[in-house]
Image (tube, rainbow, N blue to C red):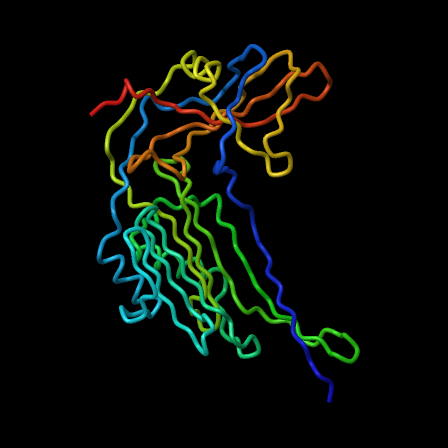
Amino acid sequence: MSRLFGVVFCVLVGTVSSGFSQERLEVFHPSAKIVWAVTNTLPDHFAIYQKVNLSNVLLSNVMAITSFKPVDIASSGHDETVFEQRQKNKLVRCLKISAVDNSIYYFETPTNYSSVENVPTFEDVVKRAQNYLLLLGGSTNEIAHTRQPRTEETVSNFDKKGGNLISKNVCSRGVTFNRQIDGIQVEDYFFVEFGSNAKIISLTMHWRNLRLYQTGKTKTTKEIISSIEKGQATIVPDIENGYSVPTAVKSLSITKVIPVYPKHGVGNLVFPSVYLEVQSNVGTVSNTTFQIQCAIISKDKIQN
């Protein structure tokens, strides 16, 4: 009888979020005149949100969903609580709840891929994910339906003697919900992955508990350009080229503006900003396009 060995593959299905989060910032210093060539419009005012603590109901729900109990607490502090379960000193399940950034992270280590069965379809995954999002304090009305990356993990069994594929089975499927509020991108997300019999094997939630704090008047075109010229904009890193932007340019044209609520706020407040798509004229046939980010409201224009 031929012996079998398995190989696990993980495939990302769909498209990822178009927004960047800047972990490190590099100030943009324009080397040419800036021209406003934007065709889309911005609202007159933007909301400013306040991040509030996770509710006790939510904390109770996440412990019930992940089957953890207070006795499983491995460490607890002002910023983060960690739950763990180990077998023979090996970590098999872990839950982290962070009060600082309103985040939840859970995973369990797969034990036996050969016994996987009844993995939910993508249609069922989406429905289940929506239900769990609600249980954990999120709103399905804030799901950005145009951006829902999906994952599918498979295990393939091969004939060890000849290396021939014997079988290929799905062992997990997952989906990511990106967030938007009133059509504006929020750099929050919810990811959940299901294994056998729709059991959750991984869950990550960075979906801040936001409440309306104030509103602020949108900067004018001249104010935005002035902010950029004063060095108050930062470069959005390109995945391939990092912070590389052209230096010897003849002109800079802002062609697109994308409002966003960034992942990081100022204290407990979350202010809106904008991604600006900039086209640089370097005197050649092909121009270079890159992105910068800057504030979209002035602090002196905040309204109660």
> From what the image shows, is residue 87 above or below residue 259?
below
Q: Horizontally, is 273 left or right of 70 in the view?
A: right
Residue 170 image offset from top left, x and y in percent:
57, 68
Image coordinates of residue 49 in percent, x first then y, are 28, 35
Q: Is residue 115 above or below residue 38?
A: below
Residue at horizontal 30 percent and vertical 65 percent from the top: 63
Residue nearest the observer in this picture, 243 or 142: 243
Is 153 left, or right, of 158 in this rendering? left
Q: Is residue 56 above or below residue 145?
A: below
**Residue in the image at 42% along x and 66% along y:** 200
Percent x, y of residue 51: 28, 41
| 9 relative to 124 in the view: left or right | right
User: Where is residue 97, by image quadrant?
Assistant: bottom left
Quadrant (top left, top right, bottom left, bottom right) of the C terminus:
top left
* Rendered residue at 64%/11% (across/down): 250
Instruction: Give the quadrant of the N terminus.
Output: bottom right
Q: Quadrant of residue 60?
A: bottom left
Name the residue nearer the viewer: 73 or 68. Answer: 73
Identify the image quadrant of residue 142.
top left
> In x, y percent, where is residue 16?
53, 45
